[in-house]
Image (tube, rainbow, N blue to C red):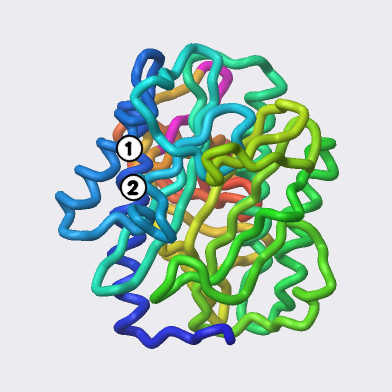
Amino acid sequence: MISIKRENEIEYMRQAGKIAYDLLMSLKDVIKPGITTKDIDDFAYDFIVSRGAKPAFLNYEGFPASACVSLNDMVVHGIPNKNTKLKNGDIVTVDTGAIVHGYYSDTAYTYIVGEVDKKTAALVENTRKALYKGLSVIKEGVVLNEVCKAIESVARENGYGVFDVLTGHGVGTDLHEDPYIPNLANHESEGIILKSGMTLAIEPMFSLGTKEVWLMPDEWGIVTRDGSNTAHFEHTILVTKDGYEILTGEWKMAKEKDGYIELEGKVLEVIPGGDFKVQLDNGHIVIARVSGKMRLNMIRIYPGDTVLMEVPICDLTHGRIIYRK
């Protein structure tokens, strides 16, 4: 049965989600060549506990860490250890969550360590885009399979492997609740209609090669059979009447209009070629261009300006500036 959360339950999940999101963003300054996967897990444990929460993964069904730390060809459930060091050219996924008053959050992010080849960089970026493309169709009344199809479309366009044995899921008072949410079209999801108050973990996982996987001898880590690199992004979200809210800390989703949402941010710098680097309150970066109307009116933009942007819901990294405050 898919549970519908009450407002007090949703608020606990917002708190748990914010902690998990802040952790993943903080790890951007921690992850670098030379650190071990155990260093990452230690940081995750200390961060979550310092916020007054409990690590969602620690001892969950016997898992021995606060974060799954999965390198390169490992899709999910990597057990951190002191011997595995990150090196230039790696990609590493950290999957983690927090518990607040018995309510879970679940989120994942794939980091690039140093410099990687173009195919791997594109895999990471397109997997992230698939997450937001899946989210873009979510609102009350939508068939769940439409979310699955949207995610799958990004993989098919780029020739990536999609793992049919690894899925998203519901989340709430347990880390894994109904429904299962595959990253590809499927018959079961056709029978599920999204309702306001559902809380779901949407998590595309793609590989540069096969969709086939092996279970590691530790009975946790799952790797691609052909050794190809994998990427994984995840958000816990709340279904609303008009769309969704990201509970893992980014922002409350504005109402969509013609495939765009409006977001406010501060200009950090001017990029050669006419683009601007704009930072939202949560630290998220958008690369934006000035709209044609603003150029026509000769409105200048400078670092430090607060601006309003239209950002496509399928790609929250790029947008256009429509107003300077």
Q: Which numbered marker is on residue 66? A: 2
Residue wearing tag 1: 41
Q: Position of 166 compared to 100: left or right?
A: right
Could you say whether the residue bearing mark 2 is in a helix, strand or loop? loop
Residue 282: x percent and y percent?
34, 48
Q: Is residue 48 magenta?
A: no
Residue count near mark 1 (Cα–Cα under 10 Å), binned few <14, some 14–19, many ≥20: many
Q: Are marks 1 and 2 in contact (CB under 8 Å)?
A: yes
Q: Is residue 230 above or below residue 284?
A: above
Q: Amino acid at mark 2?
A: Ser
Q: Is residue 280 above or below residue 62?
A: above
Q: Earlier in the sequence, mark 1 or mark 2?
A: 1
Query: In this orientation, which residue lies closer to the viewer: 29 or 242?
Result: 29
Q: Amino acid at mark 1?
A: Asp
Start-end of magenta stretch: 272-278
In which quarter of the view is residue 6 placed? Answer: bottom left
- Res 244 visible: no
Q: Is residue 170 above or below residue 224?
A: below
Q: Residue at x 77, y 83 (%)?
A: 191
In which quarter of the view is residue 224 placed? Answer: top right
Q: Residue at x 84, y 44 (%)?
A: 156
Query: Quadrant location of the N terminus?
Result: bottom right
Count of labels in the image: 2
